[in-house]
Image (cartoon, coloured by chain):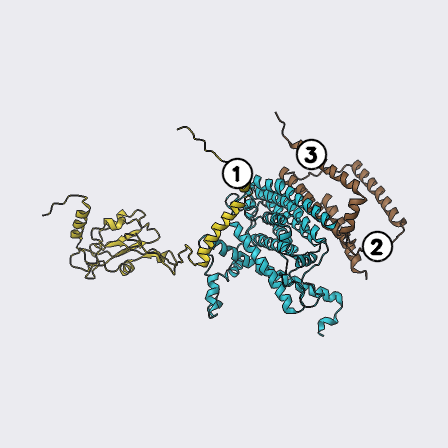
Amino acid sequence: MNVFDYLEPTTQFVIFSAVKIALVFGVTMTFVAYAVLAERKISAWIQDRVGPNRTAPPIAKYLPVIGPILVRLGMFQPMADGLKFLLKEDFTPAYVRKIYFWLAPAIAVIPAFLTLAVIPFGSTLGNPENKMVIADLNVGILYTFGVVSLGVYGIVLAGYASNSKYPFLGGIRSSAQMISYEIAMGMSVVAVFMVVGDLNLGAVIQYQAKYGWMVFHQPLAFVIFLISAFAETNRLPFDLPESESELVGGYHTEYSSMKFALFFLGEYAAMISASAMMVTLFFGGWTLPFISEPASSLLGGLLHIAIFIGKLSVLMVVFIWVRWMLPRFRYDQLMDLGWRRFIPLALGNILATAIVLAFISI
Amino acid sequence: MPDITDLLFYGFAGLALLFGFLCVANPISRSPVTSAMFLVLTIVSLAGLFILLHAFFLAAIQVLVYAGAVMVLFLFVIMLLELKEEERRKFRKFTVGAGVIAVAVIAGLLLQAVFKAVPFGTGPTVLAEGLTQPLGRILFTQYLLPFELLSLLLLVAMVGAILLTKKELK
Amino acid sequence: MSTKIVDRKPLSFFENSYLPTLVSGLKVTWKHFKKSAIQGKPLTMEYPEQKWVVPQGYRGAPYLVKDQDNNTKCVSCQLCEFVCPPKAIRITPPGPNGAPADRKNAEKSPAEFEINMLRCIFCGLCQEVCPEEAIFLQKDYSLTGESREEMVYGKARLLQLGGIHGGIQKWKHKLEEAKEQEVFPVHAE
């Protein structure tokens, strides 16, 4: 009996939730920093070169064997990146619309972190009441999509606030692309929830623990969701809005230092939350085929969280890999794919699933 | 000490009223984009009110559809057409008088309704299975005709929009 | 030439579904990744741990040389100063009352010889024009300094960096070179 148990249940819940939120936020920020590093190293290796391999703070000299290995792998590079973003000059041009200029990076970053609130990243830590999810909503997936659609505002306002040609074009293109692929993403996931029967994300994981991963039950839905996730996070092959060779910087041309860092972080955090959604919905979340019971001890809980993070990392590597695999889509091809091909495909998938479910239940 | 539900209700309702007011009568800036952003905030406050009524599905759909798609398209139109800020017009006595009378009549009706109303029930019932399944069941059985008519209405709007923007075929 | 219309075959259904492109993209990127990361053979040359081989005749930084008896070869004729395109060389001749040369065959020696390495374009004209074969463009390519004044190399530093380029009697060497190149006919005396 420690002091924790003497408090009221609501206070316990509040404190536990605050701890979970702080941990999830901290771990996600670290993940984002190292995702930037992973992107640089992996894209360097794919391009026959070496990524960052020289950043060495003074402490690296004192670590006996592992110090030089970490330096060669570039593990201290995110520290240098963070320091650069903090110390760079934060410049506000004279002709921008100031309020929206300052608001836009915040609005772009916040939804990326908010979607992580409903994702179960583990089962429990031994006590069945303390679930490893910040908000166990009954309409978890709808909350996710609502928050993702609010993320469009960041880009729209960034393009509008910059008051200049290229960012405006980039902002308009990007927001049109995002709202088009939101529809395809939402529709492709409807089939998953028809099969599971409940909108709760924990129920989806339990279903997958019993019947196998959803990616084998609904492969078309997975493919549509994967490609729509690429389009939602403005990642190649859909990165025309921020295409570095065509639009200078797209909607974040006029931003420098910390505001650009926020856009950058927001993009990688959106990638992480999209990967987390995919892991939860299609790849079984924190379960493996033989480890599917909720944890009964601290060690089991941590193992589940480690399984989740492992699957998440594999999907992040896929994100990074595809970036260097395919050429960029032209804008009309992109919109054509989103509206004229994915939406009918997703609707057909829903129809087929409904028919199969109706036959099974007869 | 009112409990947390009442406090949240007053908070969300006050915010909704404030943002609604700022949307139409913003004293600082008269640009259309500011009004659109305040409308988004009003919609989000209304979604908060839905959550207090335990209608989670409706709240999420409100944010998703209304704030996330409809208002984005509003913003597109405003930004692409580069609507200028509205100029301040002179206040004419007739307009002000008519406005005050209209507001007084409506406020009188509302206040009568509030003070003469008799409370019934104990508030929203929390369904054990959540809102989604009963909503789906009712929508596809009892209210099927309005549902199909609404989808027909959306189809008419879509076809009309495409027809209006199509270029003349020579 | 009339234009030739190239036949483009319409894409088959399989190709239209983008799957062959995806697979071939995966193969190419995996091949490169395997070579660089797993086998450890990226194309990068990690300078300064690995350096490249400077080829013969590379035009690096110009330095003053001494001959095999450790005498300064430069006689302050100022031809290199006049031929230098960016005017990077500045020579102060000794004048009529200056110090005499430090070897017996020379009439004079420069009082001060400065090359501004920031202006030098490494063209090699000074080496070509020098009648005493006293200035050579050697293989030094990485010049760094912490201020503009530091990058103006004086005579002592140039002599120290140049070293000994001895074993040459200038006109004999030029005759042999000309014979090899057959640039102009030389009648042997």
According to the rendering, which colour does chain C have? yellow
Q: Position of residue A179 (x, y in %)?
A: 64, 44
Q: Which chain is cyan?
A: A
Of the two numbered discs 3 and 2 on the same chain, state the one appearing first in sequence. 2
Tell me the mark number nearer the camera, choosing from 1 and 3.
1
* Same subunit: marks 1 and 3: no
* Chain at tag 2: B
SS at circle 2: loop
The one of A227 and B18 positioned closer to us in this rendering = A227
Are the two marked residues, 3 and 2, in contact with CB atoms closer than 8 angstroms?
no
Crowd rating for badge 2 (residues with CA inside 10 Å; few <14, some 14–19, many 20+) = few
Picture disc at residue C11:
1
* Same subunit: marks 3 and 2: yes
Residue C65 lies in quadrant = bottom left
Are the two marked residues, 2 and 1, in contact with CB atoms closer than 8 angstroms?
no
Q: CA distance from mark 2 to mark 1?
A: 63 Å
Please name the residue shown 81% across and 38% down the image: B97
Instruction: Kindly identify which residue carries mark 3.
Output: B159
According to the rendering, which colour does chain B have? brown
Picture disc at residue C159:
none
Instruction: Kindly identify which residue carries mark 2.
Output: B123
Please name the residue shown 18% across and 48% down the image: C180
Callout 1 amino acid: Leu
The one of B133 and A266 positioned closer to us in this rendering = B133
Tell me the mark number nearer the camera, choosing from 2 and 1.
1
Callout 3 amino acid: Val
Q: Position of residue C58 (x, y in %)?
A: 30, 52
Tell me the mark number nearer the camera, choosing from 3 and 2.
3
Q: Position of residue A145 (x, y in %)?
A: 67, 50
Residue C157 lies in quadrant = bottom left
* Chain at tag 3: B
